């Protein structure tokens, strides 16, 4: 009973197919509150499909998905979803995009409305975007656009962050800064993170648990021995501990 209160997402016996082609078969998965999970696996094993099902964009053919002990029947405003394609509107500035996301998340709570400008400015400052508040997407670099998408996804204080390869189109320096922001913000919010990546170093940096999805839909969960919240990626200990685990993942993932 006590343990069930710590579970945020409960995927129960879920199966899903596209036009008769089975992608996910009898999948079971528990995601705990505040924990971080990197989801890896070879191309086409169904990682994005699983994320889309948990986001409520698609329905399982069989089984059910519960979030906070409630069966999901569509999207929920406490779930934030970030893709590789960011879908920023070209006619919205950074500030407008983030304000709109906050207004949508506050839709049913008029008491929260007066704080919108302060909340937006405070998050933009944390993500290093305040000076870019009045810029449009085509005036931003790839990393700045990614940070804007991150701000938009975080402003409503979600309890679940679903991220599908959000850093894959970025150069390595920009990628590192976005990874650090994701880590810090997830920790600050106490949100659960489910992060899809093909980059093993990124998987090890962001996930305290590693989920490996294999062809045929089997899912393996491993503790990540080289996950440190406070110690940075650049410590020797991080690399030493990771090398063997990373080799193991590369074989499986
Ligand atoms: N809309 C769709 N209609 C039909 N088949 C689809 C659709 N979307 C995905 N698929 C197929 O379902 C399988 C799983 O796709 P999915 O995108 O979930 O895999 P993935 O593990 O995220 O792959 P990748 O690592 O390449 O992004 C693939 O074989 C893909 O071709």
Image (cartoon, rainbow, N blue to C red):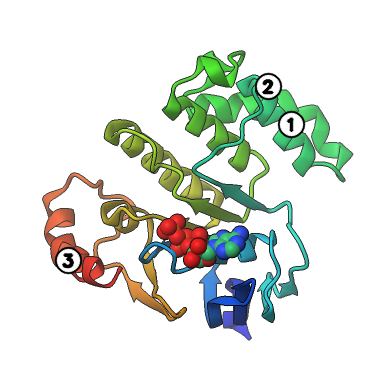
Local crowd size for mark 3, using a 10 Å CA cut-off: few (<14), some (14–19), many (≥20): few
Give the image location of residue 66, x and y in percent.
Answer: 68, 74
Using the image, tell me which numbered label, if any, was put on residue 247. Answer: 3
- Residue at image position (68%, 22%) is 92
Q: Which quarter shows the C terminus? A: bottom left
Residue at position x 51%, y 51% in the image: 163
Q: Picture coordinates of residue 182 (x, y %)? A: 45, 44
Name the residue rendered at 27%, 72% in the picture: 252
Discs 3, 2 touching: Cβ within 8 Å: no
For the residues labelled 1 and 2, say whether their Cβ atoms are less than 8 Å apart: yes
Mark 3 vs 1: CB contact within 8 A = no
From mark 3 to mark 2, how far is it between C-alphas? 44 Å
Secondary structure, mark 1, is helix
Q: Nearer the viewer, residue 139 or 129?
A: 139
Question: Which element type, helix, strand or loop, lies under badge 3?
Answer: helix
* Mark 3 residue's CB less than 8 Å from ligand 1: no
The picture quadrant where one finds residue 76 is bottom right
Q: Residue at x 80, y 37 (%)?
A: 112
- Disc 2 within 8 angstroms of ligand 1 (CB): no
Count of residue discs: 3
Location of residue 203 (image quadrant)? bottom left
Disc number at residue 134? none
Classify 72 as above or below 99. below
Q: Is mark 2 on a helix, strand or loop?
A: loop
Residue 249: give x, y in percent of width and height. Answer: 25, 68
Spatial separation of the CA atoms under disc 3 and disc 1: 43 Å
- Sooner in the amino-acid sequence: mark 1 or mark 2: 2
Judge left or right: residue 183 versus residue 61: left
- Left or right placement of residue 96 versus residue 239 in this view: right
Residue 34 visible in the picture:
no
Residue bearing mark 1: 100
Q: Which mark is residue 92?
A: 2
């Amino acid at each position: 009973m006590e343990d069930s209160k710590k579970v945020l997402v409960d995927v129960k016996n879920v199966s899903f197919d596209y036009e008769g082609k089975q992608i996910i078969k009898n999948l079971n998965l528990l995601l705990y509150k505040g924990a971080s999970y990197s989801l890896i696996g070879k191309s086409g094993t169904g990682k994005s499909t699983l994320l889309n099902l948990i986001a409520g964009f698609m329905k399982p053919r069989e089984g059910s998905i519960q979030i906070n002990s409630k069966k999901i029947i569509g999207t929920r405003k406490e779930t934030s979803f970030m893709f590789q394609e960011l879908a920023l509107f070209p006619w919205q500035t950074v500030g407008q995009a983030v304000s709109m996301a906050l207004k949508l998340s506050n839709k049913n709570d008029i008491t929260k409305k007066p704080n919108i400008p302060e909340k937006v400015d405070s998050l933009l400052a944390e993500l290093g975007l305040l000076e870019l508040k009045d810029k449009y997407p085509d005036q931003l670099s790839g990393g700045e656009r990614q940070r804007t998408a991150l701000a938009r996804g975080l402003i409503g204080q979600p309890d679940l962050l679903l991220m599908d390869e959000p850093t894959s189109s970025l150069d390595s320096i920009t990628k590192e800064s976005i990874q650090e922001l994701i880590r810090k913000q997830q920790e600050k919010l106490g949100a659960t993170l489910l992060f899809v990546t093909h980059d093993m170093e990124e998987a090890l940096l962001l996930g305290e648990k590693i989920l490996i999805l294999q062809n045929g839909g089997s899912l393996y969960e491993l503790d990540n021995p080289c996950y440190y919240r406070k110690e940075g990626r650049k410590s020797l200990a991080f690399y030493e501990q990771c090398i063997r685990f990373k080799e193991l993942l590369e074989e499986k993932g």
